[in-house]
Amino acid sequence: MSVARNITLGLAATALGSMTLAGIAAAQDRDLTVVGWGGSYQDQQGIAYFEPFTEETGIPILEESFNGGLSNIMSMVETDSVVWDVVQLEDPELQRACQQGYLERLPWDEIGGRDDFIDGGSSECGAGTIVWSIVNAYNTDEVEGTPSGWDDFFNVEEFPGKRGLRRGAKFNLELALMADGVAPEDVYETLSTEEGVDRAFAKLDELKEHIQWWEAGAQPPEWVASGDVAMTTAYNGRIDKAQTEGQPVDIAWEGQIYAIDSWAIISGTSNKDEAVEFIKYVSEPENMSRLQQHIAYGPTKEAAFESVPEEMAPRLPTAPDNLEGALLNSTEFWVDNQERLDRRFNAWASQ
Amino acid sequence: MAATTADLKQRLRRTERRRRLGSLGLFAPSVIFLLIFFALPIALMLYRAVQNPEVANTFPESMAAIQQWDGEGMPGEPIVAEFAQELRDARDERQLSAPGRRLDYEIAGYRGLLRATAFGLPDEEPEASWTETLIGIDPRWEETQYWQALKENASPFTLDYVLTALDLEWAEDGGLQWVSEHQAIYLDLYERTLWMAFVITLAALLLGYPIAFLMTNSSRRVQGILLVLVLLPFWTSLLVRTASWMVLLSRSGPINTLLVNLGLTDAPLELLYNRFGVYVGMIHILLPFMIMPLYAVMRGIPHSHMRAAASLGAPPLRAFRRVYLPQTMPGIAAGCLLVFILAIGFYITPALLGGNEDQMISYFIAYHTNETLNWGLAAALGVILLLMIFVLYAIFTRLTGTGRIQMGT
């Protein structure tokens, strides 16, 4: 028995030892970890940014992806086990995380200054990477006619079929109000009142039984292309990508909700120098605009607009035609209200 | 002589004890394993559901002092001064996020208030009083509710999470009340979870019983084939089986294509992202857990019993009802209990095959663990789920008799 015990102890010790060793090794030489939003977008980021960066600087990149939100980052920082370095964030999350100390303040001198960025494209903790938007995407085989605007999205009689919406309060409340006749410039003012929020949920109620909720950005293009849903909200670039690949999908631009995504560095990372190097690299206009050869998200620097391919320009959220009736997603509103409205959204959605 | 007998007895007893210790030693690894990986996490979860350290730990001195405050108006200057200084320390040590999040559950916007105030505080002693300084930074500090929220969270334990998990909240007068309908969510979810588990158990029983019967009463060859057919999916990963159902049930999937091509329906049916999809997936995944105990029990029932019943004049249905069915009760009980309890805790299958209206309680446990990071609430939901299982188990064993549950023969 003592032999058996010795063996057991030995095994346990070896297992523990190797686990600790693996842990230490992981902590020490983790490659620069860049976290994007997955799917076709991140594939293009790989071609436009990650591979050339590694080639030029010799710094290898480990790619990860997530569906937004701050929970991963918060738990990493709070438990002091940061395994991501650079992460792409939506603006409200970026500002909240920055205020609460979950992100490093960017050394703007090293990166090259904030002056070249468009309005709202740079901040204390974030360097803008794309202008993107939530658009109404529809299947051209399933939908007869051309829908335009969010009231057609809610019109299941004229345009029958399921609807895809992103799970959560953000974007859905705005587009529900626009569908209910609120002008884009009045949307956030209306949402600031309790009646406005009630009105948005009441509008969503009409559509509720037809909704199929998505979380990952790669889901809606797939659903709408296969006809699982007739219309869906989606990130414009991915729909554009599906369209150029010959899928039966199209975008109804009216009422698009556009926003800026930024790169940020997670507080306490062990790869800060490499992370800064990466952000500096992708913020150079000539590097930045390489993405627009591949996917229809707009650049965040004026200088980068110049090298956007001619056939891509009208497909960006910032093209003048597309900006008609568009709504700029309000960072301020969502910084203050997201948690409260998400709670209400969850109670509403699960009933 | 007597001494030797006593000696012998003692030695015998010692050997006996050593042997017993030895056999206990053999158990020890599994007991320790159970304690560390089963009992301890559950204990921690129970603890987490009532634990409330964020505010008390971050502002220890002022929270001890605020207990003396009567809850009217604002606390006195000494308490406010102590609080302001501890707030400043917390800011310098970047400890604001935990208490901020905790207090934000009480009053929306508290996190921002705490942060703005912390960064607005002067580094030296202010010329005016600390009370005026705080109000100068944000007039909300004049409101009693913000101080009451602090006082309520000054104790290291709270019932808030458990109450929230039951859709309850404290009323103004200190009693309990239901939360408003915009926030109420969990009671419906428990009810839905139980109902779905019940439907799934019933369906698994109705489907599994004939299969188990067939397995017991067919030739050895057929028995082998049936067994493999039951076990093969059982050995396949849960995730793979769920994903396969996503493919099968989708609008453009094989089932819909077949139905449309056969002309049975005009448009593809909605089979996925609704209750139907969840039921199909879960029943399929849980069916082996019903069949195996049934099969084990049925194999122990001699064929002669049914023949005897027939020879005594019972028609087949009656013989089945009076003779066969009662003997399979232990298997039915075991299968139902197993399927029901597993179904209550299901997460990934409803998450992938169901819509928002088809999620079970585990979805929200995961949601609060991963998304909102409200681990207290996640733990409280888990505790209630655990209690529910205990109660159901007690009722079940009472109904069927403890000794009747049997996993094999």
Image (spheres, rainbow, N blue to C red):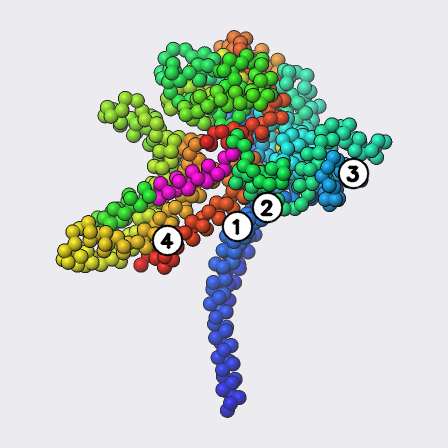
Which amino acid type corresponds to the residue marked 3 in the rendered image?
Gly
- The CA span between labels 4 and 2 is 33 Å
Nearest-to-viewer mark from 4 and 1? 4
- Visible residue check, residue A252: no
- Visible residue check, residue A6: yes
Mark 1, secondary structure of its residue: helix
Seen at 60% across and 33% down, the residue is A85
Seen at 39% across and 55% down, the residue is B398
Q: Are marks 1 and 3 on the same chain?
A: yes
Mark number, residue B50 = 2
Direction from residue B41 to residue B156 in the image, left or right: right
Q: Identify the magenta region.
A: B183-201
Report if the CB atoms under discs 3 and 4 are less than 8 Å apart.
Answer: no
- Farthest residue toward the bottom? B1
Q: Is residue A152 one of those drawn in magenta?
A: no
Instruction: Give the residue pinned by disc 4.
Output: B399
Q: Are marks 3 and 4 on the same chain?
A: yes
Instruction: Give the residue pinned by disc 3.
Output: B76
Direction from residue A326 to residue A276 in the image, left or right: right
- Farthest residue toward the front? B173
In front here: A157 or A3? A157
